[in-house]
Image (spheres, coloured by chain):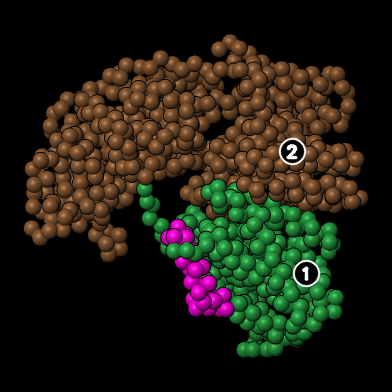
Amino acid sequence: MVKRLILIHGAELLVLILLAAIPLLVTNTFVLGLLTLLAIYGILLIGLDVTVGYLGQVNLAQAAFLGLGAYTAGITVTFLGFGMVSALAASLLVGLLFGGLLSFPALRLEGPQFALSTLSFSALVATTLNEWESVTNGAQGLSLTRPPLFGFTLRAQGFYWLCLVFLALVWMAMRNLLGSQWGRAFEALRDSPIATDAMGIGTYRNKAAAFTFGSGLGGLAGGLYAFNFQYLQPHSFTYELMVILLLGVVLGGRKNLWGAFLGATLIVLLPNLLSNRSLFQIFSAIGFTIALLAGGRSFLRKTMKPFQALAPIVAMGLLVVVSVTVQNIEDLRRAIFALMLFSVVVGLPEGLMGFAARFLAKLFHVAPAPLAEPARLDAVLATKEHGGSGMLELKDLKRNFGGVRAVDGVSLVVRSGQVHGLIGPNGSGKSTLVNVISGLYAPSGGTILLRGEPLVTGSLYKAAHRGISRTFQNLQIFTELTALENVMVAMKDTYEKPLPLVLLGLSRGEERCAQSGALALLDLVGLKDEARTPAKDLPYGAQRFLEIARGLARKPDLLILDEPAAGLARPDVKTLVSIIRKIHDIGITTILIEHHMEVVSELCDVVTVLDGGLVIAEGRPEEVKRHPKVIAAYLGASA
Amino acid sequence: MTASVVPQLIVSGALMGLVYALVAYGFQLTYATSKSINFGQGELVMVSAFVSLTLTKLGLPYWLMVPGGLLFGVLLGLFVERAAVRLALEQKSEGWILLSIILGLFFFSAAENIWGRDDQPFPTPISSDAVHLFGISITPLEISVAVGVFAIMGLIELFKRTTLLGKAFEAVAADRDAAELMGVSATRTVMLSYGLSGLSAAVAGILVSPITTVGPTMASVLVLKAFSVAVVAGLESGFGVVLVGLFLGSLEGLTSFYIGSGWREAPGLMLLILALAVRPTGVFGKAVIRKV
């Protein structure tokens, strides 16, 4: 524990002290300029990493946010006479504001559409900076003088230290944020937005927060950028810078503060690398050698696809050819960026830091932080009375898809504390019915009452907050999170600290609490020993159980299990039955969709049979099995 | 005066809009088979135009140069598929977004160094003497753009509907897995779609260059508008891109006249962001039902 603390925080502190001390040892304005830029780009890339790394989206707007922040600082200082602090605050605010505005359309989008909307935003910003000449001075550029900080005029050295202070603050805030529920939620919604909503975490809320936050950092970096260069031009913030920034994040390593820092270092050094031909030759030769060794090895051992192993070698080889044959490398700047970025994206998708982190962890044998003690199960899930009163009531519920009546007027009552089976042939409307109840689909007609009160329909998030939790027929676990984090991220009534306290790192208590609660639930489904295993590495059956544990973390009034036994091996089915029995003992009302009749007979208090979107029978399992309509529906015999 | 200026602006703008529609159609072709689009499509247009220009300078007559340029476009499309898209699709990742941006950047830089940064005129045998129709002046060159765009889109649609290969294309577009099980190679169909997409980019380059001149920066201008058209129309409707292209082109003509040519891109970009916010599947796209 102590070793871990010293190694991780010690390294951070050491680098910070080193960076701060350099200007005292080296009095070179060129070096100082590079260091200042490094601090600024560090902040910028940490912001970009939130969307590119954690949300997993290609964000092409960060250069535009840098520009917006820079111009805000420039304009407020030049025209409005702002001081340094207020101008930087304005830059941050403008970044947050536009980030928030853009997140409204962008937050509904995924993949290419997200990239496109950020690209259009960048182009719009570039157009505005260029054309709104009365304010921005257009293509001529805007000159400004660095205002004093609290009455002190900052020289280059002092300003560098200021940037460094900001970098350190942003670093700490980000580490706290990403280590909290927010960071888990960001990653979770990349893996499965549907499950994030169904677990009441809120997809849009978190996505908007992440994007706004990253954009705000872009704005802040822009303010510092303006005070560093004291001269702004619209074309500094266009497509090319954006590609360089992406290069920084990807090359440094995504989802990693050190990666962002390393990336910033590389992109600060890059222009100097290109201005010196022999240095560039050495660099490209090193790059080629690495690609050749690593690519060749994985090609021979067949750990990578041939293309993935060989393409970086070709690209780096081309770089060597360029470095030897072309006299003025500056002319080919963009092609060189492209070749480098291509090699990294294809050959080393985890970036330098992702690669180095594994290596360092092995070298120093850093044990992961110890887990909290599991809580008592009844402290997490209070035992409920098996009252038998109505928990869920459906009245004439309907859902059409075009002309298909998937659910065609279903009325039923699920009593509290019972396991209510829902069976029927394929296409009988079971899944549609629970999708309507849990809010994935809005009903076409009818009402849903939960504890006698109407349920807001058509919203997974709202249904989750009313106490409905569910699993999915096709697994929707958060693959990149560990088993423990999968349960922690869904934990209800745990995370109450407001964002500012989280940023300051004052939410450790509720983290421990969430951890011990989650461990208790993992224990319930028999996965306590797999707490640290990434969910994608769990066997199929364990993934199903994990989804149940995650559903329980919502402390639900009503738990919907959508074909939990589908695809399970026989021993796993037995485990499943015992898990559901435990849930039954706690008194959580459960709807169980299932095809395995022995599971249904063993567990269910009541069974409803659907066919063609209608209820054809209801009763105790053994009654239902003998019901002529049910036999007809399953076997096709005329009743 | 104004009375005749407005229709004139609308018609000239709409003709340019058809070129955007053709580039946007190139996005649709690849989106149909692989749910991916080439973010460097504009560079394909530009490089194909430059290659065609070089062929002309080598002394090839126009009617031989055109197939040469088109062939090059197809090859470039195939290259993009191999280098940027296939691996990402195999890994089911969205890495193709970044990789196709990177390839675009590479093509841009290469073009800058091979053909220079300046805009160059593109010779054509088609006359650019204005003809007057109902008080609007229009050149045969502009008419050739319209004819060319409709011809290539019509041919590709005909190919998709009538040939066996085209049916394979439609099958993969409808359901990739099912098509694979029926013995259609999805990888080859995606290659085909990228080839066709490169072809349409080359056509766009050859058609538009005599009007706009050829230069490395023609790509970025063109591709942003094509994105707007594709997104506003939806990535599925060929008919939609033509309509939206015509609309956006004329809107742009009016904007650059009344507000200033520096702002000409603004309406398209705002339309794009708005369309994504209000209707992410586009005006002519189908709403998707979330399935679990």
Residue A7 position (above or below residue B222): above
Query: Which mark is drawn over residue B51?
Result: 1
Callout 1: SS: helix
Q: Label 2, on which residue? A: A293
Check the residue under mark 1 and report the chain it is in.
B
Left or right of A491, for residue A417: left
**SS majority, magenta:** helix
Residue visible at 89% across and 51% down in the picture: A326
| Residue A79 in view, yes or no | no
Q: Which residues are magenta?
A: B154-181
Q: Nearer the viewer, residue A278 or A132?
A: A278
Residue drawn at point x = 47 percent, y = 36 percent: A536
Q: Gap between marks 1 and 2, in whole Å?
A: 36 Å
Dot 1 amino acid type: Val
Q: Three-letter amino acid code at disc 2?
A: Leu
Q: Position of residue B244 (x, y in %)?
A: 54, 69
Q: Colour of chain B?
A: green
